[in-house]
């Protein structure tokens, strides 16, 4: 079997240690971290030239805007699957008017809620929790739809669960 | 001319009520403000106002007699309320309604108005009788209450934000501690040191799981051991990467207070970690059964495996691990029994006093 192309991943995290850990774990799992950003401004500036398959976005960033703005921009404009990584998962706003995706939407457009994100990983996650989430995402992004339920550590947003017909 | 008319109308009480009649005297002297209006006259004017009404409104008798009551209204009076009064008069039904009214000097008062039609013997409409009650104090109190509520709500919101903030920091810090250990161990060549760091990481992750579960509950004060065991065991067994270890869970819901949760979680973590490390060595497949239940006055947690057996397993446990388990059991007031199991492996029982568990709630 041919070697699989690694997933190209964008990581947005403002805590140095957590950024380093996530990067290390992603690389150890055989993926490629193509870019990182440590603030909303840095992330937004990076998006236009970004070529990635997946983004991990910390919900709370130090500067104004925060992960929600970054996530929304990535999901809506760049049409990139976004996984929010957050220590307060209850705060993710559900967009006011969830609707069907626009007709020109790619497979990664969500239309409505969770700022268009694909999923949420709650902090603090365990090493194993993150690995299983990555395995699932790897399969889901390469050969959608995935053929199994997401692991405990990954909350799949309703739009993606519906699209993939996965009961969550 | 106008004054003469007013005087005439004021006097009409004599005709309609009879000056000597006891009830008319009572009305005149009553402490409750009262008026009578005559709907048969043009614009339904006041034909009688008692002294209490004049005191309340600050008007002279001559100011009010012969005039429609709307002179009590002002810019702050609710138009819908006025419309409802008008409708009641039109429909000849009684009404009780609060209105903001104005005194002669322009000051306002909240007026609880009670208005009723008065019909004659022949059933035809004769008068409207209206009693007023100054309820300004009640409104003032209400406003004070609302203001107090707003203040309290503000304080509560602040507290809630603070709790979220602290929760966020605790979770982030736990994640950072894990990150430090993970990153550090990557640069350590000695496998024994790495294993040791990995044990520490697992203990911290057990604490992290506790914290995550606690904050998923609304109250942040209750902790279901069954949920924790399910999460922890899935994680620990998954992390071994082994598919030849079968897990059997039989978990009754046992809810404990938050302050017991970390000790219990660390204890379960030690027990299960030991089994996974020592019971199924050298490619030995097997099963791990965990049961939580209540027996008599105890809460019972049993971890049983069909692995290599108690002698070998116990020998593999580190002295720190053993002393940690014993001390955690002590903290919980629990009895820790390690013995040979029915399936040839080891059985670890934790017998906790029933008081550890909170009463189940609906």
Image (cartoon, grey):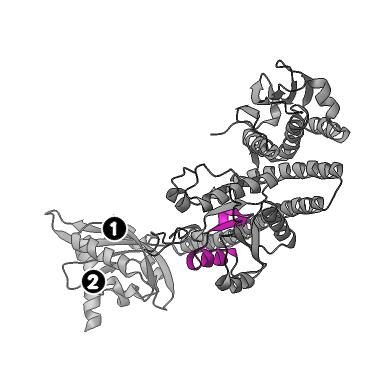
Taking depth in this image into account, of B84 and B191 the one nearest to the observer is B191
Residue B93 coordinates in the image, percent (x, y): 22, 57
Residue at screen point 60% across, 46% down: B216
Q: Secondary structure at mark 1?
A: strand
Taking depth in this image into account, of A36 and A68 the one nearest to the observer is A36
Q: Which residue is mark 1?
A: B95
Q: Is residue A84 magenta?
A: yes
Query: What whole-number distance in Å separates the C-alpha atoms at marks 1 and 2?
Result: 18 Å
Q: Residue furthest bottom?
A: B1
- Label 1 crowding class (10 Å Cα cut-off): few <14, some 14-19, many 20+? some
Query: Does A165 appear above or below A96?
Result: above
Residue B13 numbered mark, or none: none
Q: Which residue is mark 2?
A: B45
Residue at screen point 85% across, 49% down: B189
Q: Quadrant of residue B99?
A: bottom left
Residue at screen point 61% across, 69% down: A43
Query: Does A54 appear above or below B103?
Result: above
Q: Which residues, given as a range, are shown in magenta?
A: A67-93
Residue A40 coordinates in the image, percent (x, y): 62, 69
């Amino acid at each position: 079997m041919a070697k699989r192309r690694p997933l190209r991943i964008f990581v947005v995290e403002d805590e140095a240690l957590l950024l380093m850990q996530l990067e290390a774990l992603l690389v150890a799992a055989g993926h490629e971290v193509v870019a990182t950003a440590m603030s909303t401004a840095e992330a937004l500036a990076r998006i236009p030239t970004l070529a990635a398959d997946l983004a991990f976005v910390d919900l709370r960033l130090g500067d104004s805007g925060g992960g929600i703005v970054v996530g929304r921009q990535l999901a809506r404009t760049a049409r990139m699957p976004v996984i929010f990584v957050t220590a307060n998962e209850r705060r993710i706003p559900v967009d006011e008017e969830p609707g069907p995706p626009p007709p020109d939407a790619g497979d990664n457009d969500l239309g409505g809620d969770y700022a268009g994100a694909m999923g949420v990983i709650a902090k603090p996650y365990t090493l194993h929790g993150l690995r299983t989430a990555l395995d699932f995402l790897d399969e889901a992004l390469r050969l959608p739809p995935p053929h199994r339920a997401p692991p405990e550590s990954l909350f799949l947003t309703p739009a993606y669960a519906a699209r993939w017909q996965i009961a969550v | 001319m106008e004054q003469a008319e007013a005087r005439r109308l004021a006097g009409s009480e004599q005709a309609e009520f009879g000056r000597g009649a006891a009830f008319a005297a009572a009305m005149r002297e009553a402490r409750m403000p009262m008026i009578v209006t005559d709907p048969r006259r043009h614009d339904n004017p006041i034909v009688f106002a008692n002294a209490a009404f004049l005191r309340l409104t600050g008007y002279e008798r001559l100011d009010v007699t012969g005039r429609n009551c709307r002179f009590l209204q002002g810019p702050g009076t609710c138009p819908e309320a006025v419309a409802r009064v008008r409708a009641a008069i039109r429909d000849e039904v009684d009404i009780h309604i609060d209105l903001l009214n104005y005194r002669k000097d322009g000051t306002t008062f909240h007026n609880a108005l009670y208005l009723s039609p008065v019909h004659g013997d022949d059933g035809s409409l004769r008068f409207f009788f209206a009693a007023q009650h100054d309820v300004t104090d009640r409104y003032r109190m209400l406003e004070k209450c609302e203001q107090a509520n707003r203040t309290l709500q503000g304080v509560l919101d602040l507290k809630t934000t603070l709790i979220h903030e602290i929760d966020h920091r605790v979770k982030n810090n736990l994640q950072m501690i894990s990150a430090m250990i993970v990153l550090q161990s990557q640069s350590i060549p000695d496998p024994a040191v790495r294993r040791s760091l990995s044990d520490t990481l697992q203990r911290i992750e057990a604490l992290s799981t506790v914290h995550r579960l606690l904050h998923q509950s609304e109250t942040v004060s209750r902790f279901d051991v069954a949920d924790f065991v399910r999460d922890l065991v899935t994680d620990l067994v998954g992390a071994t990467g082994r598919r030849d270890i079968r897990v059997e869970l039989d978990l009754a819901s046992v809810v404990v207070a938050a302050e017991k949760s970390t000790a219990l979680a660390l204890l379960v973590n030690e027990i299960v970690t030991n089994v996974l490390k020592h019971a199924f060595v050298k490619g030995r497949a097997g099963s791990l059964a965990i049961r939580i239940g209540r027996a008599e006055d105890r809460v019972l947690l049993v971890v049983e495996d069909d692995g290599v057996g108690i002698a070998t397993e116990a020998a593999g446990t580190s002295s720190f691990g053993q002393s940690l388990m014993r001390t955690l059991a002590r903290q919980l007031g629990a009895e820790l029994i390690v013995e040979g199991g029915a399936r040839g492996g080891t059985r670890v029982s934790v017998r906790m006093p029933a008081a550890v568990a909170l009463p189940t709630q609906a």
